[in-house]
Image (tube, rainbow, N blue to C red):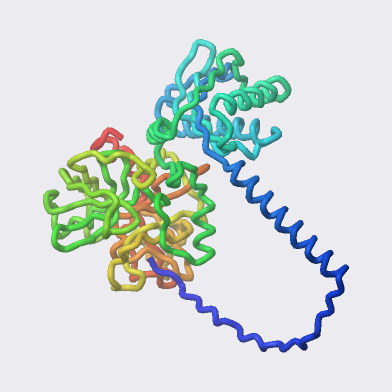
Amino acid sequence: MMYAQVEISEAEYPRVEYQRRQQFWDPIRLALFTLAIVAIIGIAIGIVTHFVVEDDKSFYYLASFKVTNIKYKENYGIRSSREFRERSHQIERMISRIFRRSSGGGRFIKSHVIKLSPDEQGVNVLMVLMFRYPSTDSAERVKKKIERILHQNLKIKQLPLTINKPSFSLTPIDNKKMRNLLNSRCGIRTTSSNMPLPASSSTERIVQGRETAMDGEWPWQASLQLVGAGHQCGASLISNMWLLTAAHCFRRNKDPSQWIATFGTTITPPAVKRSLGKIILHENYHRDTNENDIALAQLTTRVEFSNIVQRVCLPDSSIKLPPKTSVFVTGFGSIVDDGPTQNKLRQARVETISTDVCNRKDVYDGLITPGMLCAGFMEGKVDACKGDSGGPLVYDNHDIWYIVGIVSWGQSCALPKKPGVYTRVTKYRDWIASKTGI
C-alpha cells in the first residue's frame, strides 16, 4: 500500500514568563481551600467507586420469533443472497429502533439475524442480540428487562413487520455459543471481547494516519507464501477450507505442496498457519491481458473461525457499486514501488472508478474488460502495490463485509491516472460456486 506522507512540523511557541506574586493565605481562605480539596477528593472517590461497582459486562441472547406479515422466499435460505441480506437488515434495523428509543437504550449494542426459515404464518427469525449491563446484573434479570422493553414497544409502536408476541422467546447464551452462531454468518468483524467492530472504525483510523490494521479488523486476509521464498501474495478466506486469490500469483509455481497460507495481522509470527492441498486457476486466464485473473486455493485442514480468522462474504452477482463508492484494500505489500514486503498488515481506503473513466486514452486506454474493476484515486497517492496481489478489495454493507475485487494489476503504484485494477468478483460468482459449492 502507498500512503502520502504528510509531515507536520511542531510549532515553536514562545515561552511566556509570568510574574510571581506572593500568595497571602488568611485562616478563612485556608479553611475554604481545604474544604474544597476534600470535596473534590470525595467526588473523585465517588465517581471511581461508581465505575468500579457499575463495571459493564456483555450479555448475549438468542431470540426467536415469527413475523406474520411477510411470506417466505426460497432465497431466504441462502445467506449470501440479496433477499436474505435485505430482509435481515430490515429486521435488525427494526430491533435496533425498538431498543435504542427506549429508556436505557444505550444498553443495546447490536443484533444479527442468523437464520430465516419458513412458517405457516410467515417467516421464523433466529437472531443474536448483544447488550451491555452492569456486571452486578444476572442474565435472567437482564432478560426480564429486555422482554419488558420489547413487549411495551410491540403494544404501542407501529412497526413495519408484525411480530407474533406469543412466539417470541429469549435464551441467554454464553460468549462461545454467540461466537459460534456469528461464525455461521460471513463478513462480521468482532474485537477480542466479541464486541462488533463498526465499519467507521477503519475510516477513522485512516484519517488519524495509523495505517496498520488492528487484530480482527480484516480477519479474512491471508498471506500466501512459497516455502523458502516467503510472502508472495495476499488471499481472502471465503470458507473454512477455501481461499480466493489471483491466478498470476501462481505463475512461478503451481505445486500446492510448495505453498503455505498464514492468517493474522503479522506474517511473523502468524496467528494461524495452513498448508495448501489444491490450487485451481481460471481456465481462461490470460497473462498478457490479465483477463480472468482469479484462482482458488484449498487448505489441507480447515481453519477454526475466531475473532482473528473469519470468512468474508461473496457478493451476489447482481451487486453494482456506483463510482466513488468507498472500499478498502488490504495487504502485506510494499509501500513504495519495488519496496520490501511489510510484516504488518496495512489498509487503504480507496474509491471505485467507472470503467468508462478507466478506459480513457490517458488512463488505461481500453485495457479494462468487464471482468475488471478500477479503484483508487485519479490523483494517485493511495493504491495497492507489489505483494498485495491476490488480496481483497472489500465493501461494507451495514457492517457486513463483501469481497468485490481481487488485487490484479496496475501501472507502477499510486501514479496519477493509473489506479489499481482488480478482478471483479461479481463476474466470477458462478465460477467460484462451480468449483467450491460456495
Could you tell me which residue is drawn at 52 percent across and 47 percent down? 198
Q: Residue lying furthest front in this view?
A: 27
Judge whether 222 appears above or below 154 on screen: below
Judge whether 263 appears above or below 311 on screen: below
Quarter assignment of residue 14:
bottom right
- Residue 359 placement (x, y as % from top left): 41, 62
Whether residue 437 is visible here, answered yes or no, is yes
Quadrant the N terminus occupies? bottom left
Left or right of 243? Residue 119 is right
Judge whether 298 appears above or below 64 on screen: below
Whether residue 293 is visible here, answered yes or no, is no
Left or right of 125? Residue 305 is left
- Residue 79 placement (x, y as % from top left): 41, 31
Quadrant the C terminus occupies? top left
Could you tell me which residue is drawn at 42 percent across and 62 percent down? 358
- Residue 283 placement (x, y as % from top left): 20, 46
Could you tell me which residue is drawn at 27 percent across and 53 percent down? 246
Task: Decide which of 370, 307 is in the foreground and name it.
Answer: 307
Task: Decide which of 226, 337 is in the foreground and name it.
Answer: 226
Quarter assignment of residue 330:
bottom left
Left or right of 209? Residue 232 is left
- Residue 391 placement (x, y as % from top left): 32, 55
Q: Residue lying furthest top in this view?
A: 120
Could you tell me which residue is drawn at 37 percent across and 51 percent down? 405
